[in-house]
Image (cartoon, helix red, strand yellow):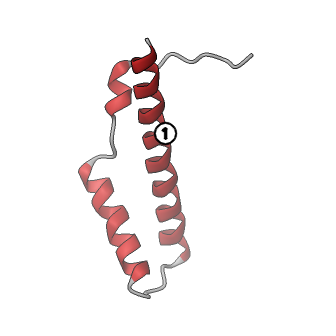
């Protein structure tokens, strides 16, 4: 049986702060332009992408639960 985790409704709409989003876009834009990121920048970008994906999944799951309830 899956474990049930209660999530405050405010968390369903939580997003990365604007400055963090801008940093992520800056790093990804540099990479897309063919510029090689150093190891620290690469790890930073990977961590921010993982966090953004986690927040998106959290939001989608929360929306689904709210529609079911």
In the rendered image, the vertical position of residue 64 relative to residue 27, given as above or below: above
Extreme bottom residue here? 34
Extreme left residue here? 18
- State the image quarter where residue 30 is shown: bottom left
Extreme top residue here? 69
Where the N terminus falls, by quadrant?
A: top right
> Residue sitting at 56 percent across and 18 percent down?
5
In the rendered image, the vertical position of residue 13 relative to residue 66, given as above or below: below
Q: Could you say where residue 53 lies in the image, as x and y percent from the top left?
A: 48, 48
In the rendered image, the vertical position of residue 17 relative to residue 41, given as above or below: above
Direction from residue 29 to residue 40 in the image, left or right: right
Direction from residue 51 to residue 16 in the image, left or right: left
Circle 1 — which element? helix
> Residue sitting at 43 percent across and 42 percent down?
56
> Residue sitting at 39 percent across and 71 percent down?
27
In the rendered image, the vertical position of residue 63 relative to residue 44, given as above or below: above
> Residue sitting at 38 percent across and 85 percent down?
33
- State the image quarter where residue 55 is shown: top left
Residue under label 1: 57
Q: Could you say where residue 8 lies in the image, as x and y percent from the top left?
A: 40, 18
> How many numbered marks does the figure carry?
1
Q: Could you say where residue 65 lies in the image, as x and y percent from the top left?
A: 46, 20
Where the C terminus falls, by quadrant?
A: top left
Q: Could you say where residue 29 lies in the image, as x and y percent from the top left?
A: 35, 75
Asked whether 16 or 53 is in front, the reply is: 53
């Amino acid at each position: 049986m899956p474990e049930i985790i209660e999530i405050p409704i405010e968390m369903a709409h939580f997003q990365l702060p604007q400055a963090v989003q801008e940093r992520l876009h800056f790093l990804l834009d540099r990479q897309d332009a063919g510029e090689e990121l150093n190891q620290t920048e690469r790890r930073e970008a990977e961590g921010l992408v993982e966090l953004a994906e986690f927040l998106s999944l959290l939001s989608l799951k929360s929306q689904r639960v709210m529609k079911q309830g």
